[in-house]
Image: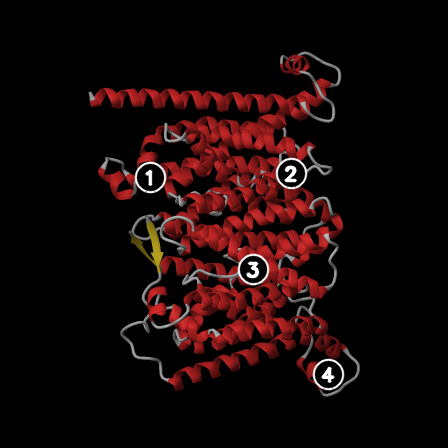
């Protein structure tokens, strides 16, 4: 009797999860399509499809095929990577504010890229990206090592991350203030996060990284959920806590590194996606995929707003940052009303 | 849930109070260091000027490079001393008010609030009087501090060091995004701001010093008057209330003093981080935890630290300069990390 109830509940929750994830996926596709169609010139769905199919359409071939398509694809990938990695960190560290960009992991990538552009005068975007990826991994390793003292404690990891990111940010400021005006433009992309100048060569490495590391994270999803109960409980339930945490951190940091190298640290996407996904999905199942989809949606929609809603074309990171500010206010209002916990 | 707790300070329980003579001796040592730092700040700069020329500038030689250097470096030194003292004091008060060993105007996002308000005021209401900058910066500092404290207090466990630091980092990030949103379409504001936001005392003039001095005096006075109350707060809210301390009022008054200091310092020198974090920890080692000693000591140590940092910044990258905010971050953040590593983790 009780078993039936449990099974029925499980089936219902699984159905709910599938439904919400499908809806999210459809929303991402719609946003993707819109960002191909909308712009200074509007192209209908038919023209866009013909361009994607490889036909030559006067005007649209260039605008959609060369400008909008790589941009939309990159936006989607970056959003997915940040969303997935963000919710991973939030779950593992059990804190809604402990997103990778807040605890300093992407600041390593930014600092390295700015260093490459301003000091080394590197002109190829690929070299800067490679340096950014390496630096993000090194930064994460450094934070991990410094936080290691009789094992890893999430609290210490977060605080040390904040300290490291303060050092890196001050180095970036030093370089920025000395940058020549023409370098400044390129360097700024690495500080706010922007999809400007998106090309296939920038999107491709990120796509590969997502293809490699998403399965790794999904494979650890169950263990990750158990980690939410606390390290001791998780260990008692058969999770090898240290190993799970290391694998998860490696995969998530790699995603962050590649995404940051491709588009800069798009502010708050990693922080916002998890909580939004949790509100949509509820406790029905794993948050990893929904958070990735929410991240993709967030970046695509924010980029549309950033490009066309104002007189100035903003980098997408500015809009997501403003959304993040609103989210913090919302967090205050909601918790003050309902007495929930952070 | 996991939180960090401060390690029991040696003077909390077992050890007897530090003798007054020892404290006085330490204050004397710090004062001498301060004097040396001030002398160094006038003597050394990004441009090498011989001591002889500097001395002759003071003794009334009319012309020469010595006089030019002194004219530039004297107000700069005074401003560095004032801002350093201010930040040290504000940091100590913030750590006492939040009972948080990691509190610092920058870590808590207070300086980012001051930046945001100043930029918004320049961009939207065309604010241009330096006096108005200070008021706006104080307002921004206050709003940001309350915002961060509110977010950091959400949920179970109240405002732990971890939650406050995270809330501060997140708020800083959000405010930075707002600042870019305001600045990007306005190139002319952007270039001024690029230099202001780093934090430095390079552009010091006597006019600036005179302008900010009254604010610093008021803030300092409020903080010093709260010393006794802060001592009571250190025992925990319940005990403090039991001893007849009006906990909320003490907290608000002391915090208001700290906000005035932070806002005014940020308005003249830009956001300078980690002085407020490092100084209280150093001073507790020197004079113990009694705020009646701790506060004056932090002012002296803060002034010394910032002046030394400024001198170092001028000397290391000759002929250009490294702004003092960058030097303090490079020195202060490792200390922050060291403090975090020392904190004990208690699983509740």
Among the two numbered marks 4 and 3 on one chain, the one whose residue lies closer to the N terminus: 4
In the image, taking residue A15 as reference, residue B42 lies left or right, namely: right
- Residue at mark 1: chain: A
| Secondary element type, mark 4 | helix
Residues at marks 2 and 3 on the same chain: no
- Of badges 4 and 3, nearer the viewer stands 3
Label 1 Cα neighbours within 10 Å, binned few <14 / some 14-19 / many ≥20: some
Q: Quadrant of the C terminus of chain A?
A: top left
Q: Could you tell me which secondary element the residue under label 2 belongs to? A: loop
Q: Chain of mark 3?
A: B
Name the element at disc 3. helix
Q: At which x and y percent is residue A310?
A: 70, 36
Give the label on residue A315, or none: 2
Query: With respect to residue B4, does B253 lie above or below?
Result: below
State the residue lying farthest toward the right.
B63
The one of A241 and B226 positioned closer to us in this rendering: B226
Is A207 placed above or below B95 here? above
* Vertical relation: A121 (above or below) A308: below
Counting from the top left corner in percent of width and height, residue B279 is at 48, 69
Which is closer to the viewer, label 2 or label 3?
A: 3
Residue B184 in percent (x, y) is at 69, 45
| Residue underneath mark 4 | B57
**Mark 2 — on which chain does it sit?**
A
Q: Tell me whether the residue at label 4 lies in contact with that at label 1, contact meaning CB atoms closer than 8 angstroms.
A: no
Question: Mark 1 to mark 3: distance in Å?
Answer: 35 Å
Q: Residue at x 64, y 33 (%)?
A: A305
Query: Mark 2–mark 3 contact, CB under 8 Å?
Result: no
- Residue of label 3: B142
Other residues around mark 3 within 10 Å, as few (<14) / some (14–19) / many (≥20): many
């Amino acid at each position: 009797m009780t078993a039936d109830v449990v099974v029925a509940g499980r089936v219902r929750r699984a159905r709910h999860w599938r439904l919400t994830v499908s809806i999210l996926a459809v929303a991402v596709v719609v946003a993707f399509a819109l960002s191909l169609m909308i712009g200074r010139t509007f192209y209908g769905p038919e023209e866009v499809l013909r361009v994607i199919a490889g036909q030559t359409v006067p005007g649209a071939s260039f605008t959609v095929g060369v400008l909008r398509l790589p941009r939309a694809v990159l936006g989607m990938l970056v959003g997915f990577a940040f969303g997935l990695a963000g919710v991973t960190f939030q779950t593992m560290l059990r804190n809604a504010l402990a997103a990778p960009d807040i605890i300093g992991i992407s600041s390593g990538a930014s600092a390295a890229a700015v260093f490459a552009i301003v000091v080394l005068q590197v002109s190829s975007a690929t070299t800067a990206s490679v340096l950014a990826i390496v630096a993000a991994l090194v930064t994460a390793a450094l934070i991990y090592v410094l936080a290691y003292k009789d094992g890893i404690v999430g609290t210490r990891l977060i605080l040390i991350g904040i300290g490291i990111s303060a050092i890196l940010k001050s180095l970036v400021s030093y370089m920025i203030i000395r940058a020549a005006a023409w370098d400044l433009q390129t360097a700024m992309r690495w500080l706010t996060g922007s999809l400007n100048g998106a090309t296939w060569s920038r999107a491709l490495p990120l796509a590969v990284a997502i293809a490699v590391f998403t399965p790794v994270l999904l494979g650890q999803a169950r263990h990750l959920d158990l980690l939410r109960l606390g390290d001791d409980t998780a260990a008692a339930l058969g999770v090898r806590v240290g190993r799970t945490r290391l694998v998860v951190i490696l995969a998530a940091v790699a995603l962050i590194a590649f995404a940051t190298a491709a588009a800069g640290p798009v502010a708050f996407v990693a922080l916002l996606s998890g909580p939004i996904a949790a509100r949509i999905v509820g406790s029905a199942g794993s948050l990893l995929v929904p958070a990735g989809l929410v991240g993709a949606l967030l970046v695509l929609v924010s980029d549309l707003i950033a490009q066309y809603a104002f007189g100035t074309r903003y980098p997408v990171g500015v809009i997501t940052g403003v959304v993040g500010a609103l989210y913090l206010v919302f967090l205050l209002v909601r918790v003050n009303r309902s007495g929930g916990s952070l | 849930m996991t939180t960090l707790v401060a390690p029991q300070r040696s003077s909390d329980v077992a050890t007897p109070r530090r003798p007054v003579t020892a404290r006085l001796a330490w204050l004397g040592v710090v004062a001498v260091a301060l004097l040396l730092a001030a002398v160094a700040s006038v003597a050394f700069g990004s441009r090498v000027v011989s001591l002889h020329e500097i001395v002759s500038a003071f003794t009334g030689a009319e012309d020469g490079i010595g006089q030019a250097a002194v004219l530039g470096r004297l107000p700069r030194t005074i401003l560095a001393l004032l801002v350093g003292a201010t930040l040290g004091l504000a940091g100590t008060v913030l750590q006492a008010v939040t009972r948080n060993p990691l509190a610092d105007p920058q870590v808590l996002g207070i300086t980012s609030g001051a930046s945001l308000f100043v930029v918004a005021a320049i961009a939207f209401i065309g604010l241009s009087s330096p006096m108005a900058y200070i008021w706006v910066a104080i307002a921004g500092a206050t709003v940001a501090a309350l915002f961060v404290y509110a977010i950091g207090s959400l949920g179970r466990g109240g405002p732990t060091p971890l939650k406050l630091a995270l809330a501060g980092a997140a708020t800083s990030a959000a405010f930075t995004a707002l600042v870019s949103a305001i600045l990007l379409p306005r190139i002319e504001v952007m270039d001024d701001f690029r230099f202001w936001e780093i934090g430095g005392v390079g552009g010091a003039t006597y006019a600036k010093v005179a302008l900010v001095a009254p604010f610093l005096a008021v803030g300092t006075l409020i903080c010093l008057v709260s010393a006794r109350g802060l001592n009571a707060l250190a025992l925990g809210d319940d005990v403090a209330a039991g001893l007849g301390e009006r906990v909320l009022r003490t907290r608000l008054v002391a915090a208001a003093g700290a906000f005035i200091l932070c806002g005014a310092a940020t308005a003249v020198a830009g956001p300078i981080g980690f002085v407020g974090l490092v100084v209280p920890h150093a001073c507790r080692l020197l004079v113990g935890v009694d705020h009646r000693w701790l506060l004056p000591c932090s002012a002296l140590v803060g002034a010394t630290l910032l002046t030394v940092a400024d001198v170092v910044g001028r000397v290391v990258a000759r002929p250009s300069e490294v702004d003092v905010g960058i030097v303090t971050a490079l020195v202060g953040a490792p200390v922050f990390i060291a403090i975090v590593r020392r904190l004990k983790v208690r699983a509740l």
